Image (cartoon, grey):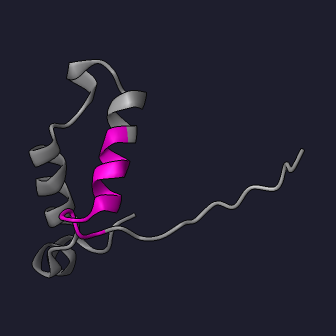
C-alpha cells in the first residue's frame, strides 16, 4: 500500500476557473447550513474585494 500522497497548494484568485469551482464545491460540502455559507456569487464578490488595490491602500493588506 502506497501511503505517500501529494498535496498541491496554489493561490486561486480567478473565480472563473475549474479550480475555484472545485474549491467552492468542497466549501459547500464542509459548510452545510445555509446561514453559515456564502452563495457562489457572494464568494466571488468577496474575492473581488480582497483583490481591490484601492481597499488595500485604504485599509492595509489582508491579514
Residue 4: percent from left, percent from top: 82, 55
Q: Is residue 60 above or below residue 19?
A: below
Q: In the visual, does 4 lie left or right of 48?
A: right
As for residue 15 lying within the magenta part, the answer is yes
Which residue is most to the front?
1
**Whole-percent x and y of residue 28?**
32, 32
Image quadrant containing the N terminus = top right
30 part of magenta stretch: no
Question: Which region of the structure is painted magenta?
Answer: 13-25
Nearer to the camera, 55 or 26: 26
Left/right of residue 24 with respect to residue 40 in the rendered view: right
Question: Is residue 52 found left or right of 12 in the rendered image?
Answer: left
Instruction: Give the tally of numbered discs.
Output: 0
Image x and y of residue 59, in percent: 21, 70
**Is the magenta region chiefly helix, strand or loop?**
helix
Q: Residue at 35% of width from left, 50% of height from top?
A: 22
- Which residue is at 21% across, 60% downward? 47
* Quarter occupied by residue 33: top left
Q: Is residue 40 above or below residue 13?
A: above
Residue at 48% x, 70% y: name it: 10
Q: Is residue 59 above or below residue 46?
A: below
Query: Looking at this view, is 18 or 23 the one in front?
Result: 18
Q: Picture coordinates of residue 25 (x, y %)?
A: 33, 40
Query: Which residue is depicted at the point 28% across and 69% down?
Result: 13
Question: Nearest the camera: 52 or 1?
Answer: 1
Q: Indicate the quadrant containing the C terminus: top left, top right, bottom left or bottom right.
A: bottom left
Dividing the picture into quarters, in which one does residue 16 lie? bottom left
The residue most toward the right is 1
Amino acid at each position: 500500500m502506497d501511503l505517500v500522497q501529494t498535496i498541491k497548494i496554489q493561490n486561486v484568485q480567478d473565480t472563473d476557473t475549474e479550480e475555484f469551482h472545485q474549491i467552492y464545491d468542497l466549501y459547500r460540502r464542509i459548510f452545510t447550513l445555509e446561514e453559515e455559507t456564502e452563495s457562489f456569487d457572494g464568494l466571488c464578490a468577496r474575492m473581488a474585494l480582497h483583490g481591490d488595490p484601492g481597499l488595500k491602500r485604504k485599509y492595509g493588506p489582508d491579514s
